[in-house]
Image (cartoon, rainbow, N blue to C red):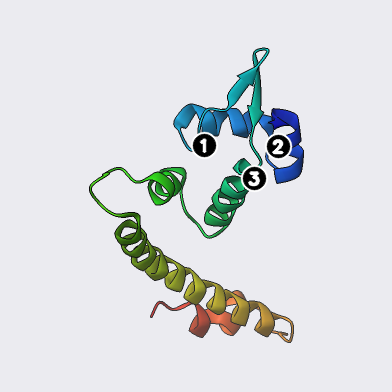
Amino acid sequence: MLSIGEVAEKSGTATSALRYYEEIGLIPPPARQSGRRVYSEDILGRLDTIKLAQSAGFQIQEIKQLLDGFDSNVPPSERWKVMARKKQEELESKINQMTKMRTILAKSLDCDCLSWEECFADNIKKD
């Protein structure tokens, strides 16, 4: 069993975030020993999943739905497929935007132009 401080240290998650995640139901309420929160080791895997999802652009409510769902009649695999398709589209859009920005930055390293528009107008047009 791990204290909230140990979980925070091992997972790189602030104790305030752990309390918040518990409050909104993103992580299950931990057991209590002498009034203190104690967690089993498996909380670390859940927190890793939460962090990975956040870094991929998932919002808290999306993560909650991903992990626990809102409709117990929908199997987790179906829920994950629907969310994966939606998030893939969002990520593809972000990848395209980031690729454009990377091109602009790379071009700027060799730029001697006198205005932004002169060098980059063609790169910033929308598709």
Q: Residue at x 66, y 27 (%)?
A: 38
Q: Are marks 1 and 3 in contact (CB under 8 Å)?
A: no
Packing grade of label 3 (10 A; few <14, some 14-19, many >=20) is some
Q: Is residue 60 above or below residue 25?
A: below
Packing grade of label 1 (10 A; few <14, some 14-19, many >=20) is some
Dot 1 amino acid type: Ile
Q: Secondary structure at mark 2?
A: helix
Q: Give residue 80's position: percent from left, percent from top.
A: 37, 60
Q: Secondary structure at mark 3?
A: helix
Q: Give residue 102's position: percent from left, percent from top.
A: 62, 77
Frontmost residue, 6 versus 124:
6
Q: Is residue 38 above or below residue 54?
A: above
Question: Which of the image's four quarters has the C terminus?
Answer: bottom left
Question: Which of the image's four quarters has the N terminus?
Answer: top right
Frontmost residue, 96 versus 46:
46
Dot 3 amino acid type: Leu
Q: Residue at x 55, y 78 (%)?
A: 99
Q: For marks 2 and 3, give the CA distance.
A: 7 Å
Q: For marks 1 and 3, give the CA distance.
A: 10 Å
Q: Residue at x 65, y 13 (%)?
A: 35
- The residue where tag 2 is placed is 7
Looking at the rendered structure, the number of numbered marks drawn on it comes to 3
- The residue where tag 3 is placed is 44
Left or right, residue 102 beside residue 28: right
Q: Give residue 116's position: percent from left, percent from top.
A: 60, 75
Q: Secondary structure at mark 1?
A: loop
Q: Are marks 2 and 1 in contact (CB under 8 Å)?
A: no
Label disc, if present, on residue 53 of the rendered structure: none
Q: Give residue 104's position: percent from left, percent from top.
A: 61, 79
Dot 2 amino acid type: Val
